[in-house]
């Protein structure tokens, strides 16, 4: 009986490990880095980051 419980426990942990380590599906489109750079440049040029109250340099 103990051997059966131990085997089931090992199988459960192995299943959980395989599910956690499974590769992420490529269903999500990759972000365009050029578009991200453009957005960040626009934010810096418009001073949106510096004027943000959450932006506290030196902390």
Image (cartoon, rainbow, N blue to C red):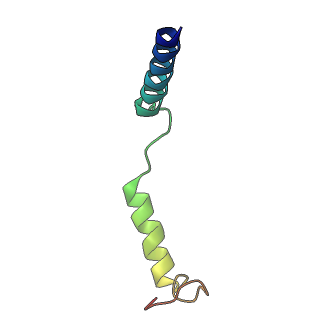
Q: Look at 48% across and 75% down and name the residue there.
A: 42
Q: Look at 46% across and 83% down and name the residue there.
A: 45
Q: Look at 51% across and 13% down and name the residue there.
A: 2
Image quadrant assignment for residue 22: top left
* Quadrant occupied by the N terminus: top right
Q: Is residue 2 above or below residue 35?
A: above
Q: Is residue 39 above or below residue 31?
A: below
The number of discs equals 0
Q: Look at 47% across and 25% down and name the residue there.
A: 13
Q: Is residue 26 above or below residue 40?
A: above
Could you say where residue 40 lies in the image, as x and y percent from the top left?
45, 71
Could you say where residue 8 lies in the image, as x and y percent from the top left?
51, 14
Q: Nearer the viewer, residue 2 or 15?
A: 2
Residue furthest to the front: 2
Residue furthest to the bottom: 58
Image quadrant assignment for residue 34: bottom left
Image quadrant assignment for residue 33: bottom left
Q: Nearer the viewer, residue 35 or 12?
A: 12
Q: Nearer the viewer, residue 3 or 7?
A: 3
Could you say where residue 43 lies in the image, as x and y percent from the top left?
50, 77
Could you say where residue 30 lies in the image, as x and y percent from the top left?
43, 44
Q: Is residue 56 above or below residue 13?
A: below
């Amino acid at each position: 009986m103990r051997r059966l419980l131990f085997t089931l426990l090992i199988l459960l942990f192995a299943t959980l490990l395989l599910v956690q380590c499974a590769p992420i599906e490529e269903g999500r489109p990759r972000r365009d880095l050029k578009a991200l750079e453009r957005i960040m440049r626009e934010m810096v040029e418009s001073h949106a980051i510096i004027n943000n109250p959450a932006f506290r340099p030196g902390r």
